Image (cartoon, coloured by chain):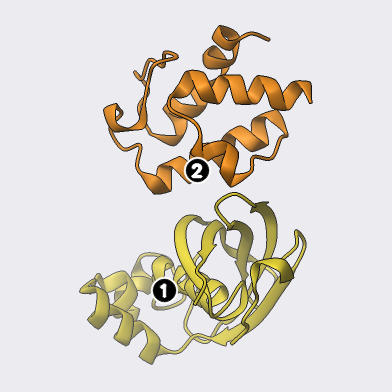
Amino acid sequence: MNNTEIIAELQPIFADILDLPDLRLTAKTTAPEVEGWDSLAHINLVVAIEKHYKVKFALGELQDLKNVGDMADLIIRKLGA
Amino acid sequence: MNDYGWQDLAVGLGATFEVLITAQMLDDFARLSGDYNPLHMDPAFAQAAGFPGRVVFGLLTASFYSRLVGMYLPGKRALLHGVNAEFKNPAQTGDCLTISGEISYLNEAYRQIEVKARVVNQNGKIISKATLRAGLHEQ
């Protein structure tokens, strides 16, 4: 899967967790620009993504992420590992 | 009170306790919440609505999820992040409720546990089911 395909899969996960059905994610989307994407919502997003892809993230990996595109890249690396 | 640290926790770890529901609990909950709906306060009103007596507040039964996390899973270091609860059946005063929960997921990065929990009455009927999320602080 490539970055764009992962982001398309993340779209409904984010929409559900953030309760934003009209949310449109791009690779450049960041937390501060999305309503309700606070620290607790971030944990919920990470847990939902872990469960969806059956992967586990380390805190250090998550701290390096700058946007949704980085998250998609991390997922690709995890799935390929 | 349990004092589990992160390293002590594992998927499948559980806890159970029982609570006898009294009329005084309903009175206290009404005073705390400000919810004096007659379904919970007036036995005659509740009976006219088809219930045997005062209906226990759903959130009173759900308040025991707070005890489950704060006293048992993980106990002392708990910080409750979220409760997704459904009320399946009404409870009555005099019911002996069993509250149980089991860790269903561990998020290592943010040290958050997920607990699948339920409240069951003395007849085995499910009163409430919930998914609880709690973090662990270091103190």
Q: Position of residue B117 (x, y in %)?
A: 62, 63
Q: Which residue is mark 1?
A: B60
Q: Is residue A41 above or below residue B67?
A: above
- Please identify, in this view, whether the residue under mark 1 or under mark 2 is nearer the observer: 2
Name the amino acid, label 2. Answer: Asn
Letter of the chain that mark 2 sits on in the rendering: A
Q: Residue at x 69, y 23 (%)?
A: A77
Q: Nearer the viewer, residue B49 or A19?
A: A19
Q: Colour of chain A?
A: orange
Q: Is residue A9 left or right of residue B11?
A: left
User: Within 10 angstroms of label 2, few (less than 14), some, or many (20 or more) residues?
Assistant: many
Image mark 1: chain: B
Give the image location of residue A12, x and y in percent.
Answer: 50, 22
Q: Amino acid at mark 1?
A: Leu
Give B37 or A23, whichever is nearer the viewer: A23
Is residue A11 visible to the viewer in this orientation of the structure? Answer: no
The crowding category of the residue bearing disc 1, from other C-alpha atoms within 10 Å (few below 14, some 14 to 19, many at least 20), is: some
Going 51% across and 27% down the picture, which residue do you hit? A13
Residue wearing tag 2: A44
Residue at 61% across, 72% down: B74
